[in-house]
Amino acid sequence: MSELPPIAEADLREWRLLESFGARVAQLAEERGVAASWSDPRRHLKYGQYLSLFLFGLVNPVLRTVRALSAASRLERVQREVCGQRVSLGSFSEAQSLVDPGFLETLFGQLAGEFHGPVPQDPREAAFHWLAQDSSLWRALPRMDWALYGGGRTGAPNRAVRLHLGFHLLEDKPLVAQVSTGQLCERKAWKQKWQRGAAYVGDRYYGEDYRLFAELIAHECHFVVRLCEQATVNVEEELEVSAEDRAAGVCRQAWVHLGADARARQGGARVRVVWVETPTAGTLRLVTNLEPQTLSAELVARVYRRRWQIECFFRWVKCVLGCRHWLAESPAGVSHQLYLALIAAVLLQQALGRRPNQRMFELIQLQQMGVASLEELMTGLRREADLMDGRLAKRRKNS
């Protein structure tokens, strides 16, 4: 794990999340030739005002419904700093169909690309930009019929929205995102976002289709993916396990072909499997296309252990940012909300040098509302940062 940078008061003194966001929306709109408002002269709500008000609702603990946002837009300070005018329920709802989710996807990609985390302590880790790939479900409301798929555990209809995410493990930040219905296959969504030359980390679901490994190699991608327990491994060449590898829990590694069918093995990729003993999950079988000289078995195990960071990020978005209550119910509106949540995460991390925990986020909200002073905010943030650094050092020592 990398050292986190200290929180600087100069970075926060003039920082305003909504102002930063509004400036970037205007800049991207100008670059893409997007009109500041819509062509209908009767529609006074502008592009950036709608998005800023939406983001304001996500980071404000008081406003949890569109009606609350509409009522808040009557306040003079909200109009001055957020939306510029009173926003009716109808205007907010209709704006969902007029704002292209691709606009926010592009903005999120730009912001995520500009923020760089600390340099890893071990230079061997920095040889590849590892992206953990996973997805998480958001439960949809019964009237969101477009999100309906399959049946629930009790046979009742199941409605959900899925956020597919590529998470940069070394810089601890979201990097690539896609919003879909819960029905879309995770592997299919992942394949649509492959980047030539990238390095991916995936859990056992991504290791169920052996054909993907050959396609990733053909795409010049690297990977560390866990195999499912039922995977058939045909060993071709055993490899040496060093003392450093054994200290990391590695008990075996070998070049193999996967699959029980002879024809599938013949046409499949030759990959390396690393067996790792863990105290909780038993023996993990991790597959990679990298040679031991490029990525040792110990580093294979370490890279896969880092995959938990994406699970923690999903939990952060849902529990700390509180993005579990829908402010919009259309497919476009839901995409706006999830992309705005990711943008808020990047902006907060960019300002603090780290993703804030629950107490930090509460302090920021109190300071934004004028309840806490800047000095009280800095004192609280530094206190929480020290606690986070202490837990990080303890975890590094135990690992």
Image: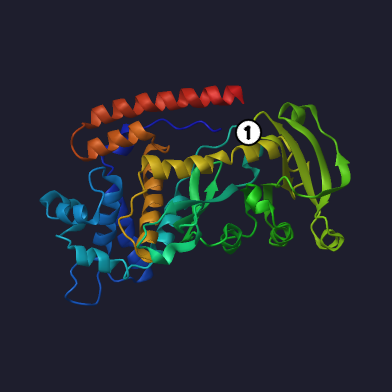
Residue located farthest toward the front when viewing the structure as drawn: 154
Query: Disc 1 residue type?
Result: Asp
Q: Quadrant of residue 373?
A: top left
Q: Is residue 258 above or below residue 218?
A: above
Q: Residue at x 21, y 32 (%)?
A: 372
Q: Is residue 260 above or below residue 4?
A: below
Please give left or right for residue 179 compared with residue 245 in the image. Answer: left
Q: If the image is split into quadrants, where does the N terminus sit?
A: top right
Please give left or right for residue 349 compared with residue 80 in the image. Answer: right
Secondary structure beneath dot 1 equals loop
The answer to whether one can see residue 19 in this image is no
Please give left or right for residue 197 compared with residue 234 in the image. Answer: left
Q: Residue at x 30, y 46 (%)?
A: 59
Q: Quadrant of residue 62?
A: top left
Q: Nearer the viewer, residue 325 or 211?
A: 325
Q: Nearer the viewer, residue 349 or 190?
A: 190
Question: Please, which colouring scheme is shown?
Answer: rainbow
Q: Nearer the viewer, residue 137 or 26?
A: 137
The answer to whether one can see residue 315 in this image is yes
Q: If the image is split into quadrants, where does the C terminus sit?
A: top right
* Picture coordinates of residue 46, whole percent (x, y): 23, 66
Residue at label 1? Answer: 122
| Pointer 1 local density, CA inside 10 Å: few below 14, some 14–19, many at least 20 | few
* Picture coordinates of residue 34, whole percent (x, y): 33, 70
* Picture coordinates of residue 115, whole percent (x, y): 45, 46
Residue located farthest toward the bottom when viewing the structure as drawn: 40
Please give left or right for residue 336 compared with residue 300 in the image. Answer: left
* Picture coordinates of residue 395, whole percent (x, y): 55, 25
Q: Is residue 122 above or below residue 79?
A: above
